[in-house]
Amino acid sequence: MVIGIKTYKASLKVTFRTSTGEVFDESVDIVLDADSKEEAKARLENLDASVEVDDIRITSVHHVGRGFKPA
């Protein structure tokens, strides 16, 4: 007997469509509670979802180089 809650991380490829009709794909990881990997997968297959933005935070800044003045 297991006491506690099992969580599984699912990596999803999500297709987004903006209000202006722009379509783009993103990889999204989510963590969900389930008793087994099979149950977690069954909960996600053929899923129809709605989205509400709860929070957005910066995670990193990528520097691609610096401009320089030639001598």
Image (cartoon, rainbow, N blue to C red):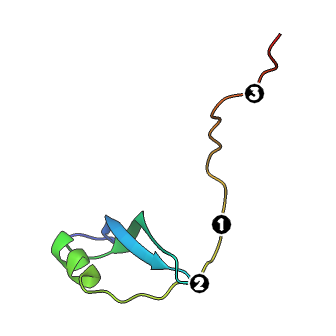
On residue 35, the disc is: none
Q: Under tag 1, what secondary structure?
A: loop
Which of these two is toward me, 71 or 18? 71
On residue 56, the disc is: 1
Q: Under tag 2, what secondary structure?
A: loop
On residue 67, the disc is: 3
The residue at which mark 2 appears reads as 20
Which amino acid is tagged 1?
Answer: Ile
User: Residue at image x 65%, y 43%?
Assistant: 61
Characterize the local packing of mark 2: few (<14), some (14-19) or many (20 or more) Cα atoms within 10 angstroms.
Answer: few
Q: Count every numbered label the image shows and give the total.
A: 3
Q: Are marks 1 and 2 in contact (CB under 8 Å)?
A: no
Residue 1 visible in the displayed image: no
Q: Under tag 3, what secondary structure?
A: loop
Residue 63 lies, with reference to residue 11, above or below; the image says above
User: Residue at image x 38%, y 72%?
Assistant: 14
* Residue that extends furthest to the front in the rendered view of this protein: 71
Q: Is residue 36 left or right of residue 67?
A: left
